[in-house]
Image (tube, rainbow, N blue to C red):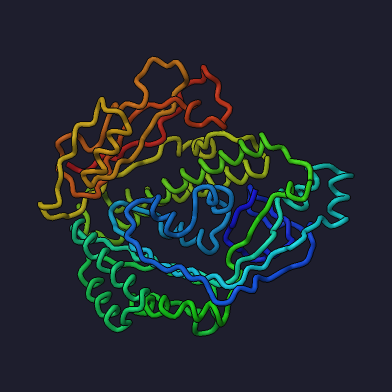
Amino acid sequence: MERFIPARPGIDIGYGFNTLTGEVRGVAVDGDVETATASGQSAQSNSVVVESQEQMMESLNVSVEVSGHYGLFSAEGRFGLAEQSAFTSQSTYVVAKCVVENAFRSFSRPSVLPEAAQRMSSDGPDAFKAGYGDAFVRGMRTGGELYAVFQLTSTSFEQQRTIAASVSAEVQGLLAGGSVSASVEHLTKSSSQVSSMSTLFYQRAGKDTTISPVTTPDEIARRLKDFPSIANAAPVGYLAQVVDYQVLAMPPFDEVGFQQRTEALEDYARLKMKYSGMRAEIDLVRHNPDLFLPDYAGDVLAKGYDTYTAVINMLNRHARRVAGKEIEPSLFNAGEYDPALKELPVFVFRKKAPDSDLVPVPNLVGSAVDAAKSLLTSQGLNPTSNGVGIASGSKVPVDVVTGQSPAAGTSVPKGTSVVLEYNYVAANRFKWARLSRDASVLRKPFTPVLMKR
């Protein structure tokens, strides 16, 4: 199997790699290294408006699969940017990027080093994997990558979407060869019309002044325009081609156990995104009190932020233990690490929005969960799952909304989260986990924190 992963310090052609933990291991492979000689560069540049977690991950070229394997263990590069850009439905985002590919370096005829082959034949697959991982780095893509994330938040959901579209259009026009000065002028004007605008920036390639941090819209616009030249003058290896040892006729490792842990790590990555989004929304409200109704006291928000920070750290620890074979893959339960975290708070924040932005929350009780989510999304609201895992054969409704918050008929601004209560069969959703068919009902993961009335 072949995959491309973001390069990290210490990685290079020939090194072994643990695809579960993302750890670089010893050099196991050697061979002739060739560099593609195609003339010119390949550059991909665009700017898009992002309104979902899935769109955010796709825009940053970070998949759930890759996050599950490596992002849970690393805050480097794009993984760090993705974590800092945790999505909240209260904001609209613009992601601008430029990815430049120069030459591709790779082995032409890779072969296992004698000492590595001896480790496999003498000590077996587990010892080999401990020293050299389950895959090796066959090639490196050189050039560079640049990502900028604009987060726009306004009391008016429609206004922030309009401004986001304007920012994206100006950046896109610049990337297509438009005027830098005109684009900067429009970007500055657009950013002044929203109540809050923050920017995150990540660059890989360049040196000295060409890699110095930039934060304002005009600086980022200029850097995007100049980036192909920067990546040509001072390129880096930014993507590693990782290939399983089976291509070298090595015996396979424990494929069943490996697949089970892989699926578990991907589920942990999804859960981490959810927790990170909740924490990001709490942080947004804490730092922008003028945009939101005072439904929660400051100490409640601070406690909620600290709670999700602690839970994310526990989830990372749990994932490391699973990836490192310290424990078997299991459903993450923060309460097992800290009894005080058996149930987590979930908040419903409301903006100080104009009447034109208010929509009534529909009655969703009794509806199929997927249908309820689609209806909320179509009305500009954000469905938040609060499911209860149950055992097979339980005499309760499954995948049907049994409760909601806010209540039906409540007028809320677009972008507001609506919490959906429902039951699901845990064994069907988490097929990798070893769940008994007659297992007791799993504890509900969240406890709604009521708004002031």
Residue 112's x, y, as percent?
A: 81, 55
Q: Which residue does the image show at 47% across and 30% down from the upper left?
A: 429
- Nearest to the observer: residue 8 or residue 42: 42
Q: Quadrant of residue 180?
A: bottom left
Left or right of 345: which side holds 333? Answer: right
- Nearest to the observer: residue 13 or residue 295: 13
Instruction: Decide: is 56 above or below 250.
Output: below
Q: Decide if residue 311 is in sight here.
A: no
Q: Which residue does the image show at 20% across and 69% down from the upper left?
A: 193
Q: Quadrant of residue 141?
A: bottom right
Position of the C terminus by quadrant:
top left
Residue 209's x, y, as percent?
A: 50, 84
Q: Farthest left residue?
A: 355
Residue 13's x, y, as percent?
A: 71, 64
- Nearest to the observer: residue 64 or residue 249: 249
Instruction: Decide: is 144 above or below 161.
Output: below
Left or right of 241: which side holds 271? Answer: left
